[in-house]
Image (cartoon, rainbow, N blue to C red):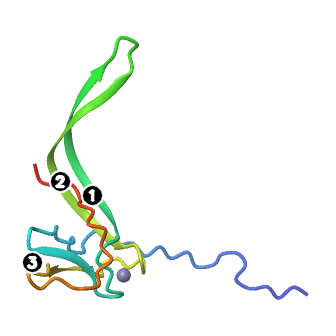
Amino acid sequence: MLGVSGALGGWECPVRLASVSAPTPTPTATTRWRCRQCGNLTRFDVTRTSRTRDYVHVDLAGEPVVEEREVLAEDVESVRCRWCDGVGTVELVPRPGPDEGPGETADTGEHGAGAP
Ligand SMILES: [Zn+2]
């Protein structure tokens, strides 16, 4: 007698955030992202909607190449922490001042998309 229960017809309960959650604000010149769950400051998955205008250069063979991209509008939808996979755990914190730099930051100094 097979008393298997729950093999079929199990609850499939997709928890859908109906995108009502407040979007994570974009860091400015004086703020940065920080995951308040694990303290991550450097690695994030950013989902963003951007409206861009591309300068497409099509060569004689018909191969298009985007030579220039101008961002007309950008909207950060969500930021997920790469370390703990936390969504909604990323907040804005002030950047350390130039004179009070932390001594042991293993930051490689990589910059994101710089302002034009
Ligand atoms: Zn985290």
Q: Residues within 10 Å of mark 1 (few under 14, many from 20)?
A: few
In the rendered structure, which disc, 3 or 1, sits on the residue that comes first in sequence?
1
What secondary structure is found at the residue carrying circle 3? Answer: loop
Q: Nearest the camera: 62 or 116?
A: 116
Q: Can you name the residue that lies furthest to the right here?
A: 1
Look at the image and tell me in which quarter the N terminus lies.
Answer: bottom right
Name the residue beneath numbered marker 1: 48
In the rendered structure, which disc, 1 or 2, sits on the residue that comes first in sequence?
1
Quarter of the rendering containing residue 32 = bottom left
Q: Is residue 35 visible?
A: yes
Residue at the (87%, 85%) spot, across then down: 2
Residue 94 location in percent, x, y?
A: 12, 81
Q: Can you name the residue that lies furthest to the top here?
A: 60
Name the residue beneath numbered marker 3: 98
Residue 107 location in percent, x, y?
A: 30, 73
How far apart, in angstroms, are the residues tagged by discs 3 and 1?
A: 30 Å
How far apart, in angstroms, are the residues tagged by discs 1 and 2?
A: 7 Å
Q: Residues within 10 Å of mark 3 (few under 14, many from 20)?
A: few
Q: Nearer the viewer, mark 3 or mark 2?
A: 3
Q: Is mark 3 within 8 Å of ligand 1?
A: no
Can you say whether 3 is above or below 82 in the image? below
Q: What type is the residue that disc 1 sits on?
A: Arg
What secondary structure is found at the residue carrying circle 2? Answer: strand
What secondary structure is found at the residue carrying circle 1? Answer: strand
Q: What type is the residue that disc 2 sits on?
A: Glu
How far apart, in angstroms, are the residues tagged by discs 3 and 2?
A: 29 Å
| Mark 1 touches mark 2? (CB < 8 Å) | yes
Can you say whether 115 is above or below 36 in the image? above
Residue at the (42%, 81%) spot, across then down: 84
